Image (tube, rainbow, N blue to C red):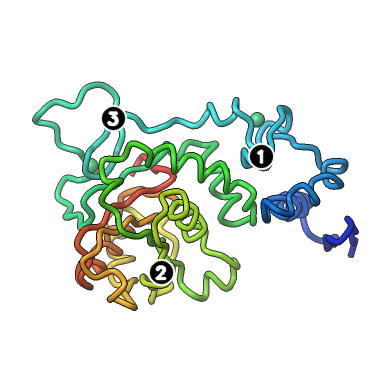
């Protein structure tokens, strides 16, 4: 085991782990708190300069989530035209007789869903690092993408509180955090709304949706969630946050139990939109 002693911070590096994990941990340490940042960064910058963790070439700071402007430019923001119900983006004009293939024949319990960017190769890679490799230093970038999208949201004045899509307790213990809760907390603080991290609970350890088709996804999560502490959200207009939305099956299952528990309206906003199902 290697120990990096940087003043009052010690970084432990187990040599059988990937070097990237060490970098992730250190970069996350650098993000820990604003008050400590200057203390921590001065010695760390000597070892790990502020470099974009995508292209490993251009400069990128902790405040940018270590992704440079050029790489951020490779993310595709979702702009009009898109389906007003589920947020699916389209090329060209949407006519009055338009019917979205994702919404067709589906009953959505949320008033609308919308995502910041398309889940292209780069975005999927960043999300994978954030979810599974502990790259929490990406948070400032994700926060910025969320708040950019929400700044002109038609529902912005209506939301009373922010909730994350929960992880099952077993998976959360394994991972150490719920990526959606981290994002939802940032969104709540950016919008100055209360964050309720424990109102929605995942009661079934459902397998990943990745390999499932549309109907299997809906079935997989149909009874996966419940609401605890109903009083906090009774008659409220809720902003539900997740990292990625593909068919909307997961967030729809959450919205269904929330409405049943007395929530008035549920809006779904996610960082990325998966296409191709
Ligand atoms: Zn870059
Ligand atoms: Zn749609």
* Distance between the alpha carbons at the discs numbered 3 and 2: 31 Å
Quadrant of the rendered structure where residue 94 is? top left
Dot 1 corresponds to which residue? 66
- Report ligand 2 position as a quadrant: top left
Secondary structure at badge 3 equals: loop
* Quarter of the figure with the N terminus: bottom right
Image x and y of residue 250, in percent: 33, 59
User: Do we see residue 59 in this rendering?
Assistant: yes
Image x and y of residue 244, in percent: 42, 49
Image x and y of residue 186, in percent: 49, 53
| First-in-chain label (3 vs 2) | 3
Secondary structure at badge 2 equals: loop
Q: Residue furthest top?
A: 92
Tell me the residue at 76%/53% (across/down): 26
Image x and y of residue 158, in percent: 25, 51
Tell me the residue at 89%/57% (across/down): 7
| First-in-chain label (2 vs 1) | 1
Above or below residue 17? Residue 176 is: below
Secondary structure at badge 1 equals: loop
Tell me the residue at 73%/35% (across/down): 51
Q: Nearer the viewer, mark 3 or mark 1?
A: 1
* Distance between the alpha carbons at the discs numbered 3 and 1: 30 Å
Above or below residue 173? Residue 12 is: above
In front of the other: 168 or 197: 197
User: Do we see residue 211 in this rendering?
Assistant: no
Dot 3 corresponds to which residue? 90
Instruction: Give the numbered dot on residue 206.
Output: 2
Q: Residue furthest left?
A: 97
């Amino acid at each position: 085991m290697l120990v990096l002693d940087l003043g009052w911070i010690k970084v432990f590096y187990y040599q059988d782990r990937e070097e990237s994990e060490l970098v992730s941990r250190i970069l996350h340490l650098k993000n820990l708190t604003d008050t400590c940042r200057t203390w921590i960064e001065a010695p760390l910058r000597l070892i790990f300069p502020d470099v974009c963790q995508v292209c490993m070439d251009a400069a990128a700071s902790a405040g940018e989530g270590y992704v440079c402007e050029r790489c951020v430019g490779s993310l595709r923001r979702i702009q009009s035209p898109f389906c007003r119900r589920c947020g699916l983006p389209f090329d060209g004009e949407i006519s009055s007789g338009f019917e979205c293939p994702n919404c067709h024949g589906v009953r959505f319990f949320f008033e609308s869903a919308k995502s910041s960017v398309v889940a292209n190769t780069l975005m999927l890679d960043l999300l994978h690092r954030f979810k599974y490799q502990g790259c929490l230093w990406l948070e400032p970038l994700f926060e910025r993408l969320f708040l950019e999208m929400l700044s002109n949201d038609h529902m912005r004045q209506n939301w009373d509180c922010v909730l994350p899509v929960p992880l099952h307790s077993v998976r959360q213990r394994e991972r150490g955090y719920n990526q959606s809760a981290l994002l939802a907390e940032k969104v709540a603080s950016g919008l100055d709304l209360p964050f309720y991290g424990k109102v929605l609970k995942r009661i079934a350890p459902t397998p990943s949706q990745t390999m499932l088709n549309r109907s299997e996804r809906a079935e997989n999560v149909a009874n996966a969630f419940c609401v605890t502490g109903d009083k906090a959200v009774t008659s409220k207009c809720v902003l539900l946050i997740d990292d990625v939305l593909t068919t909307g099956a997961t967030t729809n299952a959450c919205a269904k139990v929330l409405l049943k528990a007395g929530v008035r309206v549920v809006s779904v906003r996610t960082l990325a939109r998966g296409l191709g199902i």
